[in-house]
Image (cartoon, helix red, strand yellow):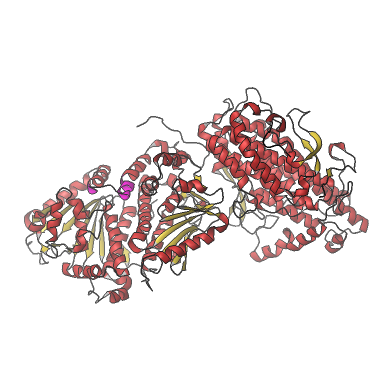
Amino acid sequence: MSKIIDFQTDPSKYRHWRVEYDGPVANLYMDVDENGGLFDGYQLKLNSYDLGVDIELADVVQRMRFEHPEVKVVVMRSGKDNVFCAGANIRMLGGAAHAHKVNFCKFTNETRNTYEAAEEDSGQKYIAAVKGACAGGGYELALACNYIMLTNDSSSSVALPEVPLLAVLPGTGGLTRVTDKRKVRRDRADVFCSIEEGVKGQRAVDWRLVDEVVPNSKFDEVVAERAKEFAANSSKADVEKGIELTPLTRSFADDGSVSYSLVEVAVDRNANTATITLKGPDQDVPADMDAAQALGADLYLLRLARELDDAILHLRLNERKVGLVVFQTQGDPEAVLAHEKLLLDNADHWLANEILKYWKRVLKRVDMTSRSLVALVEHGSCYAGVLAELLWAVDRSFMMLDEFDGDNRHMATVTLSDSNFGTFPMSNDLSRLETRFLGEPQQVEKLKSSIGEPLEAEDAEELGLVTYAYDDIDWEDEVRIFLEERASFSPDAMTGMEANLRFAGPETMETRIFGRLTAWQNWIFNRPNAVGANGALQRYGTGQRGEYDMERV
Amino acid sequence: MLDLINVSYDTQIPNNVGLSQDKKVLKALEKWHPGYINWWNDLIPQNFQESMVYLRTAVSVDPKGWAKFDYVKMPEYRWGVLLAPQVEDRRIPCGEHFGEPAWQEVPGEYRNMLKRLIVIQGDTEPGSVEQQRFLGLTAPSLYDMRNLFQVNVEEGRHLWAMVYLLQKYFGRDGREEANDLLVRSSGSEEAPRMLGAFNEETPDWLSFFMFTYFTDRDGKMQLESLAQSGFDPLSRTCRFMLTEEAHHMFVGETGVGRTIQATVEAMNKAGIDDPYDTDKIRNLGVIDLPTIQKKLNLHYTLSLDLFGQEVSTNAANAFNAGIKGRYMEMRIDDDHKLTNDTYKVLDLEGDMIVEREVPALTAINMRLRDDYVRDAAGGVGRWNKIIEKAGIQFEMKLPHQSFNRKIGVFANKNFDPDGKMVSGAEYDKGLQEWLPTHADGDFIQSLMKPVYEPGKYASWIAPPKVGIDNKPGDFEYVKLHMA
């Protein structure tokens, strides 16, 4: 699986999904093209999916927010008879390298989280209208919706058959959402998650697995009715028109480097390192949100978010040996703050809201990236407001102290804004500053008095906003030695250590999915009982069962 | 009517499973039985419920007991629970447990797979009765009406047999599935039967004969492979069901044969030798041979779909688990495990039909379908003998397996009955020649007038050569209740 995976798509290229817009209601049909798999060697039968299918879904969800803000209810349904969705394609999983499986699951998890949060973030409510088999990843798709309707035809059921059938877990949030979101009683959850056939009809409601069962003959009618009802009761403001998410400008170099309009990704494959440089604004702040909307996808903070998002995904899937990602920024911090201020001041404007919520997701994507992350605060940088969040998303940060010989860029500073105090919560539902100062909550309060003040290295280090500040004499060696040392550690130990240290504080459903569920799933994905030559995943489809080593570990 | 309060299960329900001593199953059947009787009563038109029908009842599994003929009202038919006698030291005949003693209880690890197979099989049994519920109103003779009802009550008994297994061996889940068998209903918008072919209408008697010949033959093949099950109670149940299934196919084969017989006799009598002289032939009150061929095409291809995907994980799992074997498993000379074997399946490469070797385990469905195709060819040959004997130039043919398919690699592709891929336009045009049109349906319907006089037959069908239970030609097989 060495081909480049592109996360950019648009409706003209979709092979697996289609959307019918009907005023405030959008009908989202999953109709997977069997022969449209991302890789060779498997067919996407019965609406099963692979990463390619999910990339399209992520695109649909994103465009729903920006291009169709008039939509208040999205009805997710199947374009096929007799099957809603059979989940992730087993042959694809069986044939995929471990790293691909892990990245696939991570991306699908992020997509599920995105549309699950769409109701709270943007007032777009997702309904799953389930007709036909809805198993494994199919039920996980439905679980991430805000409301689940199941037809009562005495054969359609919802099921999580992974454990009995494949010896793996429902790892795209399945186990967690059953207990934490649907709040299914644990013994019933235990029954549900260990039977292949799932649960149908009234019992699915009684067990809280779905919200409603509907007589089969009235299914479409009731679904349409419910969608209308939810749309009418929605508090989402009416928005006439969205903006178009135009294609990104980007080019790839042979050495793996990628250039966007505001983001440069320099890849050094020998050093297993990538440097992501974010540029400050290249345009004036629009006078108001109307002017901002007129700029559309060209608006600085939106364009930057899209490019950074794409760069992160590209590195995750296509540059898997890059173990260390270095963040840099270059530009005018004042201008960054001014662009951000327009959004913060107009947070009730739909587009401002969408862009801020998008930054929340992109920053979470950074948090969740299993690479060593470091930020360099050099002279000429613009770590202000939203971009300062990167400093607390990374594992370590280094800042230039005092003037550097022959460097005439403006002095390195860090500038806090209101947004650093709650606009971009992490998956643990705390701000990055709250997480950073978990043991000294008073520090967060204290930092509020520094809002808007460009903090130079000494102050930034003193206030705990960066790890180390180095002057001209130390900088080069200290940074080099750190980078070299970091790149030499075991990538497994690094991933494990970082994932544990990054998410201090309370558990949420999201941290449980990305922590507990994912970690167990990834362990199972390494165990012979699942992936060995005679494991259940490899044997699936051959007729022979997996052979299990019955030792409990 | 059956006294539902005081059912004496050992007398009302012929059984060889010690029903009256089995408290668990008794309790379950007591709850299920009223629902079943309601289902039956709501199904068949009332005057037939009250009629005395000369039916065969199985009261035991020995040669003397399995075919007792007498007049009975259908709701009082004694639906028995009968298993073929236990074979001593029976072994699992296939899969990874090959050679181990057959299971007398459900193995926990295969609970779901077994249950699903039994539910699907069970779902087809009442399905066909539902499809045929109104045919009594247009029966071409009392003989045929009696055959219809015989098939119906036996399908009902087969439902009982599956329900018994669900209730006896699958605990609470099994009871719920048994109840759902009475909830789903053929063609229902609310809760249709599980398999497509059992939601199609059986609009006329020729369809009924085609159905019993082709679709019940799929049932036979499924029962044959379930009769090989390592789960002994399922095997024994299916083995006994097969004795009855044979009669259903007899009804189908002779029904189509007698229809053909009437057609060629009428043609000869009128001096018509061109089988395509449709209007003239139809004016004789018989069904022209090309229309019979179209019906054959339809029912044969619908039945092929029942075998599922050519390459199937579920079928592989079931075989390897030893819960579903192949047709005549015991007579096949191989290791009965198939872990290293391959089997040829039909596949598509572009527009070309090719044969491809695939792991034999995954091709279990295809193999059973191949056996079916061979099995189904026999009757067609006998039909052609009738035509040949009458001196008419026409040959009935099984269409190619790629034609008119909704499941498998050929699904929704434009193949003609010879297996040639044709353009969309050619296909649309050809369909009128290949499958029954609405106009054909209108014509056949026009012939569907009941004939209720003993010994008399509708114009479009010839009398049988021999009566049921060797009864004479004018025997009153159904004493109609004319309220």
Of residues B255 and B386, the one nearer the viewer is B255
Task: Determine if the magenta segment contains residue B22.
Answer: no
Of residues A39 and A188, the one nearer the viewer is A188
| Residue B77 in view in this figure | yes
Q: Is residue A353 found left or right of B237 in the rendered image?
A: left
Q: Position of residue A158 (x, y in %)?
A: 48, 48
Residue positioned 50% across, 33% down in the render = B109
Q: Is residue A306 found left or right of B194 in the rendered image?
A: left
Q: Residue furthest top?
A: B88
Report which quarter residue A116 is drawn in: bottom left
Residue positioned 19% across, 60% down in the render = A388
Report which quarter residue A58 is drawn in: bottom left
Q: Main secondary structure of the magenta part?
A: helix
Magenta span: A501-515
Q: Is residue A298 found left or right of B146 in the rendered image?
A: left
Whether B224 is drawn above or below B302: the answer is above
Task: Determine if the magenta segment contains residue A514.
Answer: yes
Report which quarter residue B445 is drawn in: bottom right
Whether A229 is drawn above or below A465: the answer is below
Q: Position of residue A289 (x, y in %)?
A: 28, 74
| Residue B326 in view in this figure | no
Q: Position of residue B261 (x, y in %)?
A: 86, 50
Of residues B159 and B415, the one nearer the viewer is B159
Quadrant where the N terminus of chain B sits is top right
Whether A465 is drawn above or below A190: the answer is below
Residue positioned 66% across, 31% down in the render = B236
Q: Is residue A280 found left or right of B25 in the rendered image?
A: left
Q: Position of residue B29 (x, y in %)?
A: 62, 35
